[in-house]
Amino acid sequence: MKKWMLLGALALTGCAQITQYQQAVKTPVPASLQGYWQTSGPQSGLVSDQAIGSLIISAQGDTLDCRQWQRVIAKPGKLTLLNGQYVNVNKQLRVMPLELEGEVLHYDKLKLKKVDRPTLECQQALEEVSAQPDAAVIQNIQPQLMRAVFADPSAQQSEPAAEQPATQQR
């Protein structure tokens, strides 16, 4: 069964004759696909066990594919119907089918579950998409995971006196 789904997805991707992003017609989506979708735990479609994959789908059909680990890569796109199946077309013309199986969304080698809100980084990426509507990729957001405590002096806490090394007197 999985082989047939994979072959169907590959065939669908290969048949997509979208040569310009504007050719893809944005399609309003059913309520079952709308919302914030996110991976949980390690997945083979991500570069690291610590990486997070998210897909944001608006009621109007706008999408944001947001991946984060050591950096954030967010790709805006739109949902469209292609041969009777919902696919995400990003501004780089990559066409990826969506398959909802129960409460799990299969998308680009990922298994995503619906969450209440996107990660902070994906929220920032959404704001950047509004500020840069023609951008094909948003990459100027630093993940929380990579923000070092020492980079923000106000976040540093002094150690208790008992834990500080004793100074030697000469």
Image (tube, rainbow, N blue to C red):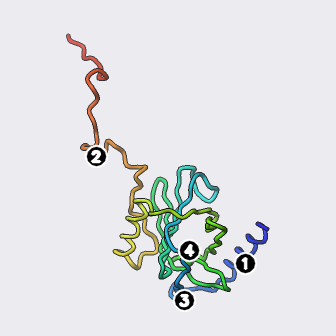
Residue 78 at x, y percent in the picture: 51, 79
Name the image quarter holding the C terminus. Answer: top left
User: In this orientation, does residue 162 appear?
Assistant: yes
Determine which residue is flagged by label 3.
23
Ranked by sequence position, the earlier of labels 2 and 4 is 4
The outermost residue toward the left is 170
| Disc 2 target residue | 152
Q: Residues within 10 Å of mark 2 (few under 14, many from 20)?
A: few
Say which amino acid is labelled 2: Asp
The residue that label 4 is drawn on is 33
The answer to which of marks 1 and 4 sits earlier in the sequence is 1
Say which amino acid is labelled 1.
Ala
Q: Which residue is mark 1?
A: 11
Residue 67 in the image: state x and y as whole percent: 50, 61
What residue type is disc 3 on?
A: Gln
* Circle 4 Cα neighbour tier, 10 Å, few/some/many (<14 / 14–19 / ≥20): many
Q: Is residue 61 left or right of residue 2?
A: left
Q: Earlier in the sequence, mark 1 or mark 3?
A: 1
The answer to whether marks 1 and 3 mark residues whose Cβ atoms lie closer than 8 Å is no
* Image location of residue 46, percent across then percent down: 58, 57
Quarter of the image with the N terminus is bottom right
Disc on the earlier residue, 3 or 2: 3
Label 3 to label 2: alpha-carbon separation: 46 Å
Q: Which one is earlier in the sequence, the residue at label 3 or at label 4?
A: 3
Q: Disc 4 residue type?
A: Leu
Could you tell me if residue 108 is visible in this image?
A: no
